[in-house]
Amino acid sequence: MDLKMAGERNSPADRLALASMIVCFLATGALLIGTLAAGPFDQHPRGQIPSTTTTH
């Protein structure tokens, strides 16, 4: 089997793989942008960070 025939036989799988990669890329991009856009609004510019060290 030569390379051209092998490429033609794999063409549907290649298209499906490309389509699924595009869908995953768009979905993760939308999730990232949505998460950043709908982040917590209760952050204050001068908010105190709680200390995790114990003082004795």
Image: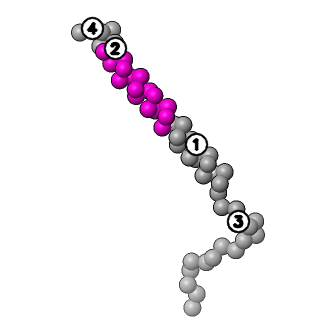
Residue 47 in picture, x, y percent from top left: 72, 71
Label 3 is placed on what type of residue?
A: Gln
Is residue 42 left or right of 56 when viewed as pictured? right
Q: Residue at x 52, y 40 (%)?
A: 27
State which tag comes first along the sequence, 2 or 3. 2
Badge 2 marks a residue whose secondary structure is: helix
Marker disc for residue 2? 4
- Mark 2 crowdedness (10 Å alpha carbons): few <14, some 14-19, many ≥20: few
> What residue lies at 41% left-to-right and 22% top-to-bottom?
15
Q: Quadrant of residue 2?
A: top left
Give x and y (percent) for residue 48.
70, 74
The residue singled out by tag 1 in the image is 30
Q: Which residue is drawn at 36% across and 20% down?
A: 12
Identify the mark nearer the N-term, 4 or 3.
4
Look at the picture and state if 5 lies above or below 48. above
Element at label 4 = loop
Label 4 to label 1, Cα distance in Å? Answer: 41 Å
Give the crowd class for mark 4: few <14, some 14-19, many >=20 residues within 10 Å.
few
Spatial CA span between label 4 and label 3: 62 Å
Say what amino acid the circle numbered 4 marks: Asp
Check disc 2 and report the residue beneath it. 7
The question of residue 10 being in magenta is answered with yes
> In the image shown, does 9 or 55 lie closer to the viewer?
9
| Of labels 3 and 1, the one closer to you | 1
Quadrant of the image occupied by residue 17 = top left
> Which residue is identified by label 3?
43
